[in-house]
Amino acid sequence: MRKHSFLIVIFFVLSSLKLWGQQPEILLIGVFHEIPADQRCNWEKPLKKLLQYKPDQIAVEYMMPEDPLSLNKAYGPTYRSWFDSVMLRWEGKRVNIKDSIARYVKLIQQSDIPFYRAKLWQYHYLNMDIGNADYQLFRIMQAKDNWFKIFDRTGYAAKAFLKNLRKATNNMKLTEFHNLVFPLAAAMRIPFVHPTDDKSTYTYQSETFGRLAEALEQTPAYKKMEALWKRYAITEEEQKKKCDAVTFINRKEWLDTTDAAQVRIINETEHPDAKDFEIIWYYRNKSIAKRISEAVIRSKAKRMAVFYGNMHIYPLKMYLEEMGYKVKLLGDL
């Protein structure tokens, strides 16, 4: 009997170890949303580490096409009818967007040509999935063959595509997406990224902070806040000049200070709006963490790389670990 019980214990221990080995791992990467072109060297070390890490899925700070509250904040209450009108103008009829996306994903697997990616951009855009639309623009920007000679530039969709391609060429090159996220996704042959942002509370968050700043202006508490943010900005600029800023802001010691800068020092004021700001900030991040978890489960990711503005990393790590995930930081690689 004792031997039988011992074998049962061993079985459960081995089963637990097996499950632990299969547990998805989440890598959080804090980023700047823009770095000047002359300081582009700051992206190089992190990208090298990420290429060695080899994630199989990527989550990004873009709105989800299935999130009407966030889309309403971004595009206004008539956004859906506007996108429907764009579809009719481009396609001449209503089409099944998901089927169209699946079709061009399959065609790209057979022959990866920019024209197919232009069509995939078109359907991601119509699906209000701007993150994946931008990813396709990036892939086309990297194409070396002169496909423009055979590209039909007539029609609403073609003109819109070319306009967005020119816009992306000018605007995207300074961002984390052009320098870190999309190059990594392309190198890992990841066909699409997972938008996970929640902007449904963004307006209220901004308004709350605005009221707080106005109420505290010229007080000792506000001057203390200003001094902290000034030191924060100076440190980051110094690290950018050393080509080490992205690596630096992902150190655990530095990420701990971001929560102080974003929430804790504001709470010291004991102003009613300070508590409101804290609640809405953590609510947003808890919602994002839930969406990241859903993306991990849906995609069956083994290694999910998650890119967000560095202020988000502290609360995202906290909530994801509460969910039971093994969470790594860029500094752990």
Image (spheres, rainbow, N blue to C red):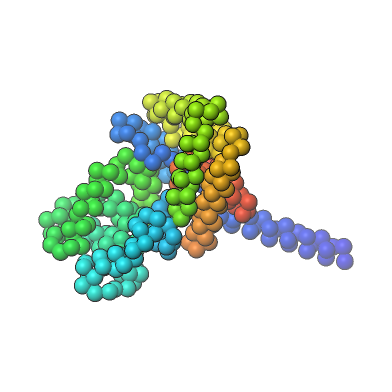
* Residue 143 at x, y percent in the picture: 24, 51
Q: Is residue 88 left or right of residue 244?
A: left
Q: Quadrant of residue 52?
A: top left
List the single residue furthest toward the right: 1
* Residue 164 at x, y percent in the picture: 24, 53
Q: Is residue 119 left or right of residue 189?
A: left
* Residue 278 at x, y percent in the picture: 56, 44
Q: Is residue 95 left or right of residue 147?
A: right
- Residue 256's place in the image compared with 104, above or below, is above
* Residue 181 at x, y percent in the picture: 39, 47
Mark yes or no: residue 37 visible. Answer: yes
Q: Who is closer to the viewer here, 323 or 83?
A: 83
Q: Who is closer to the viewer here, 305 or 195?
A: 195
Q: Who is closer to the viewer here, 300 or 167?
A: 167
Q: Quadrant of the N terminus?
A: bottom right
Q: Quadrant of residue 192?
A: bottom left
The residue under the point 56% across, 55% down is 24
